[in-house]
Image (tube, helix red, strand yellow):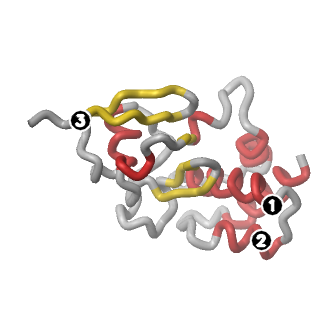
Amino acid sequence: MPTPSLPLTVNGQTFAIQAAPETPLLYILRNDLALNGPKYGCGLGECGACAVLVDDQIARACTVPLGAVRDKKIVTLEGLGTLAAPHPVQAAFIAQNATQCGYCLNGMIIATVALLHHTPAPTESDIRAALRHHLCRCGAHMEILAAVRAAAQS
């Protein structure tokens, strides 16, 4: 029996995806849709590298099954802004040089967008709580915090 086609709306476009409903969303985003913003980090939902927005809520794409996001709006890093017109959070991360290797940045930026959507004027503890489950091994923590504060003020 053929795999049924599932509708998936990503970055404003709707796709008919042929995959089992239990397929991790991350695999579809990266392999089928060629979106490289969400990264494969741990595969367990622990590191945050694969974060996406699902109906404006942060989600770990490596642990979300495709069937769970049917009829939901998914936004990846690529859906936030462009090189010519970056999203204000992306612009703040660029302005603050909040990167080293960049592997964690997808999750950090997505988490910041979700935070500012729900808490437009976050406190320092709000910012730290929003980012606490996003792992960065390069040590760009101070610049990342500065970028979130700058994005909140823009």
Mark 1 lies on a secondary structure that is loop
Q: Give the residue drawn at x 29%, y 48%.
A: 21
Residue 44 at x, y percent in the picture: 37, 67
- The crowding category of the residue bearing disc 3, from other C-alpha atoms within 10 Å (few below 14, some 14 to 19, many at least 20), is few
Labelled pair 3, 2 in contact (Cβ < 8 Å): no
User: For numbered disc 2, what is the local secondary structure?
Assistant: helix
What type is the residue that disc 3 sits on? Pro
Q: Are marks 2 and 1 in contact (CB under 8 Å)?
A: yes
Residue 32 occupies quadrant:
top left
Could you tell me residue 140's position as x and y percent?
66, 62
Which quadrant holds the N terminus? top left
Which of disc 1 and disc 2 is earlier in sequence? 1
Residue that appears at 60% across and 34% down = 79
Q: Is residue 133 above or below residue 101?
A: below
- CA gap between label 3 and label 2 equals 42 Å
Q: Which amino acid lies under the numbered mark 2 shown in the image of this protein?
A: Asp
Question: Is the Cβ of the residue at disc 1 closer than 8 Å to that at disc 3?
Answer: no
Task: Give the distance between the C-alpha atoms of the residues marked 1 and 3, in whole angstroms.
Answer: 39 Å
Q: Which residue is mark 1?
A: 119
Residue at image coords 45%, 69%: 46
Q: Mark 3 falls on what kind of element?
A: loop
**Which residue is at the front of the view, 135 or 74?**
74
* Residue 64 image offset from top left, x and y in percent: 40, 56
Name the mark nearer the viewer: 2 or 1. Answer: 1
Q: Is residue 23 above or below residue 136?
A: above
Q: Which mark is residue 31?
A: none
Asked if residue 123 lies left or right of residue 113, the reply is right
Q: Residue at x 58, y 57 (%)?
A: 58
Q: Which mark is residue 4?
A: 3
Label 2: how many Cα within 10 Å (few below 14, some 14–19, many 20+): some
